[in-house]
Amino acid sequence: MNALAIWKDVSNFGIVDALIVALVAILLVFLVLIIIIFVTSVFQKSLDGFEARTKILPKEQNKILADDHDAVVAALVAVIDFHKETGKNAEIISIQKVED
């Protein structure tokens, strides 16, 4: 059975031919899905390895960032404000909580 013959002579196209075409189409779809799953799993494993090598640990003097989300927001606002006023980039070296 030739794939081109199916489309040229539709009058002889029976239920068995239709089932064969449907089965081939279903198998192609699942084959493509398996390939996509394989490729994404390979990418995920490579990203996990990359994250393990590049994990950033907070400095001891910046433990406040892990505990206080308001301190993170305050630090970001201060850096953005500094950049807007001076046009220079800033780096936060340490953060300390000051009591009122």
Image (cartoon, grey):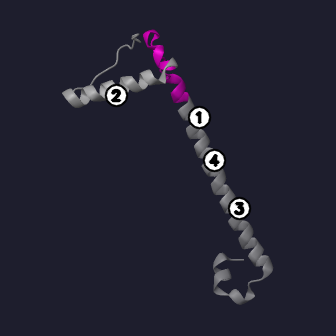
| Rendered image: mark on residue 45 | 1
Residue under label 4, please give it: 37
Identity, as a three-letter code, of the amino acid under mark 3: Leu
Q: What stretch is highlighted in magenta?
A: 49-66
How far apart are the two marked residues, 3 and 1, measured between alpha carbons?
27 Å
| Rendered image: mark on residue 77 | 2
The local secondary structure at tag 2 comes to helix
| Label 2 close to label 4 by CB (< 8 Å) | no
How far apart are the two marked residues, 4 and 1, measured between alpha carbons?
12 Å
Residue at the image point whose x is 59% and y is 45% from the top: 39
Q: In this view, does 32 lie above or below 75?
A: below
Q: Which of marks 4 and 1 is nearer the N terminus?
A: 4
How far apart are the two marked residues, 2 and 4, measured between alpha carbons?
42 Å
Q: Earlier in the sequence, mark 3 or mark 1?
A: 3
Mark nearest the camera among 3 and 1 is 1
Identity, as a three-letter code, of the amino acid under mark 4: Ile
Residue 12 located left or right of residue 45: right
The image quadrant where one finds the N terminus is bottom right
Mark nearest the camera among 2 and 4 is 2
Residue 66 at what x, y percent from top left?
50, 19
